[in-house]
Image (spheres, rainbow, N blue to C red):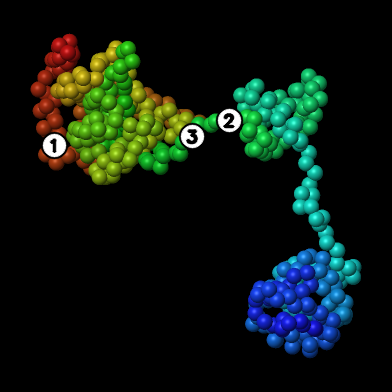
Amino acid sequence: MSLKEGSCFQRGMSLKRGCWVDHHSMVIDMNDTKLVTLEQLRGFLAGAADLGLTAVANPAARYGLIKGVLKRFKYPLLGKADRGVVRRYLLRVTGYSRPQLTRLTAQYLRSGRLVRRYRGNPSSYTRKYTPQDVLLLAELDSLHASLSGPATRVLLERAYHLFGQSAYARLATISVSHLYNLRAQPLYQQQRVHYSKTQTRPSTLGVRRAPAPEGRPGFIRIDTVHQGDHDGRKGLYHINAVDIITQWELVATCERISEAYLLPVIGELLAGFPFEVLGFHSDGGSEYVNHDVAKLLEKLRVEFTRSRPRHTNDNALAESKNASVIRKQFGYAHIPQHHAADMNTFCREFLNPYINYHRPCYFAVDDIDAKGKVRKRYPRELIMTPFDKLRTLPSRNVNLRPGITLDTLAQEAHQMTDNQAAKALTDARSKR
């Protein structure tokens, strides 16, 4: 080894084009032909251990260096320990990684040569689809309003095979996945700007499943009924809450379904049931699936569930009550929002007592046949009011609110006959 203007073991040097280059503008030639024994290599490695030398030579120079060292030391004839010394030396002076140097030495052992296996041009793949194809695809998407990938491929195939348009010869064989790659190219984007709606994120509020009351009252289903529009003005909203087991139903009214109007009404409904509310089930409407309602239910320790996709029965009870109770009482005509307070008083004083103490409901019995099919029957003895249904439940399942007993509820139920309650309801509705 011959060195000019200094030692190669000085810090801050790197190997460039077969030379050690000092980072302080000092160039040092490297000639390792005098390293001919393994002991000399070990001495070099011991002396250069702490210098932090890095090799950045061009690939041709490093390939020549590696081949020369392997040939000079008769690498194929060396033992395992001696091969390790040569490899450590090459790692130090070439800067290659251990796996890369392993591949190069294996190539030398197989053929006695070191040949680069890649071309100088990184873009070694032939481009099949030309810029004209990209422009043609953009034009077709513009005409057909950007159909899905499979549908667009069918159009390309039809253009070439059915209508004989030779310009589509290459695009007719494109895969659906690569079609989307062409759509992502800048040339396509310049010709065809496509706007897509913001993708909504699924809400994590509430559990998507049907309630599981297990014979206990207090699991309510809730829904909203809009009372019509008129000349672009919204009508008021009815909030309908129904218990699953007893069909105890409470109806309230609010001007709008924003949080400021809806939350007090929900709180009033939850407090109006004679038993503790354990579950709250709604559809996917944003008036219920929001953080404010979830925070209210969490504070009251009420389980929050919501309907599952393609399971129409999850909220079917509330939907049926919308038709049989609310639409029968209020119809479909527009009711202005400023009447919400009067309508809420009407529901609390007349409608809710009538439907819970004086209006009979059907309660089903499930019969399972030999094939496992469930059939519902509605026997005569199970047609009763929600209050009567509540009295038939085992006492261990009924968790009445403090200060409320079945006797106090019975006294309220017997203040009027069924006909008197219905007449009072009809008279109050006609006055409004």
Quadrant housing residue 25: bottom right
- How far across and down, in percent of the image, does residue 83 sit? 79, 80
Res 409 seen here: yes
The amino acid marked with disc number 2 is His
Between 283 and 248, the residue placed more toward the observer is 283
The earlier-in-sequence mark between 1 and 3 is 3
- Name the residue tied to disc 2: 194
Please tell me whether residue 238 is drawn above or below residue 175 in the rendered image.
Answer: above
Identify the mark at residue 198; answer none if there is no mark: 3
Identify the mark at residue 404; answer none if there is no mark: 1
Between 319 and 239, the residue placed more toward the observer is 239
Q: Nearer the viewer, mark 3 or mark 2?
A: 2
Q: Which of marks 2 and 1 is in front?
A: 2
Measure the alpha-carbon separation of dots 3 and 2.
Answer: 13 Å
Measure the alpha-carbon separation of dots 2 and 1.
Answer: 62 Å
Please tell me whether residue 158 is drawn above or below residue 260 in the rendered image.
Answer: above
Q: Which of marks 1 and 3 is in front?
A: 3
| Label 1 with label 3: CB-CB less than 8 Å | no
| Label 3 with label 2: CB-CB less than 8 Å | no
